[in-house]
Amino acid sequence: MSTLHANIPIKPAYVDLHIHSTASDGSLLPAEIIEIANKVGLRAIAITDHDTLEGSIEALRHQHSSGLEILSGIEISASFDSGTMHILGYLMRLDDASLIETLKVVQEARANRNVQIVKRLQHLGADISYDELLEVSGGGQIGRPHIAQVLVRKGIVENMDGAFNKLLKKGRSAYVERYRLLPVEAFQTILRAGGVPVLAHPFTLNAETEGDLDTILADLKQAGLKGVEVYHPAHGPALTAQYERLAHRHGLLVTGGTDFHGTAKPGIHIGIGRGGLRVPYRLVEELKRCAASGLRPYSVTP
Ligand code: AMP
Ligand code: FE
Ligand code: FE
Ligand code: ZN
């Protein structure tokens, strides 16, 4: 009877490796995220808050009772002239001194920028205060979505998109630049902490052609990049296929997640995105293999 289980189909296991909590601009606590991930039946998650490990640290406190595998995660903004570059980091040691120190610098730059944005808005005649931002952010890293939320709540703009499109996005009157790490600095910070750096939602780089993105990925890989976020609710079938192709060509890992933010991005659900997203567990195994191999800066081994 050694084939007792032979005919029982193995239930596929899915994960969500891109989730925001109240530690940055998400609307749910890490514990609430874990509860939903369990209901959805996910096997593993990573909380990837903007420029902070606090969401991951809090989630990992619940590791034993969670019924899930929880990977440490973060999403770091890097400088990139022609678009937005977000770099996901997975499986970092959370007590790495250089990582913590670097994040402190980045967080300070973010806080200073927020003060400047509020000043700009006040100058433009908007009745908004920094205290109101503190209130909506609930103590985590404050981002432009929080500012947008206050602007909506006070009837200054109609909705979140309006806040970004009229005031907050690059080129608009209340946009303020901030210090960001160079891509290579973000990669090396994550690698030194034992983690795996992955390029988030590549379309935000605004590369015009597949050839352009191909060149960018070659440069980023040289600088330490290890993976590409291929599965994301904003990637349709053509983009998903393109990113998969490019990841393979460059020997980069593939990851995926929903970029769940709760009420800040309505219509996106943990584990499934807009309904159709499925990210297989085997990608987590590959991430773990990469982290365990201790690949170091500028390594050329995929
Ligand atoms: P920040 O990190 O403060 O520079 O803000 C960037 C964040 O704003 C990103 O996490 C995006 O998810 C979010 N964001 C960008 N555009 C929009 C939008 N139109 N509506 C809601 N959130 C947005
Ligand atoms: Fe966000
Ligand atoms: Fe992002
Ligand atoms: Zn994100």
Image (cartoon, rainbow, N blue to C red):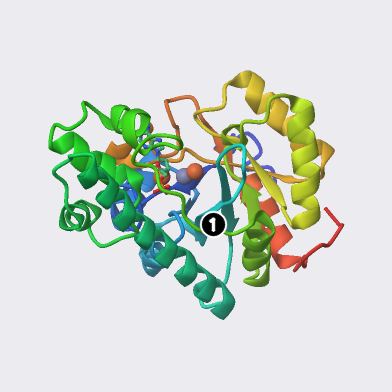
- Please name the residue shown 41% across and 36% down the image: 169
Q: Image quarter for residue 134? A: bottom left
In-front residue for pair 67/286: 286
In-front residue for pair 260/40: 260
Q: Image quarter for residue 89? A: bottom right
In-front residue for pair 31/101: 101
Task: Judge left or right: residue 144 versus residue 106.
Answer: left
- Please name the residue shown 62% across and 71% down the image: 193
Can you give x and y, in whole percent of width and height, for residue 258 in the image?
47, 38
Q: Residue furthest front?
A: 123
Mark 1 secondary-structure assignment: loop
**Type of the residue with mark 1:** Arg
Reading the image, the residue beneath label 1 is 180
- Image label count: 1
In the depicted structure, whether residue 181 falls above or below residue 274? below
**Is residue 5 in view from this perspective?**
yes
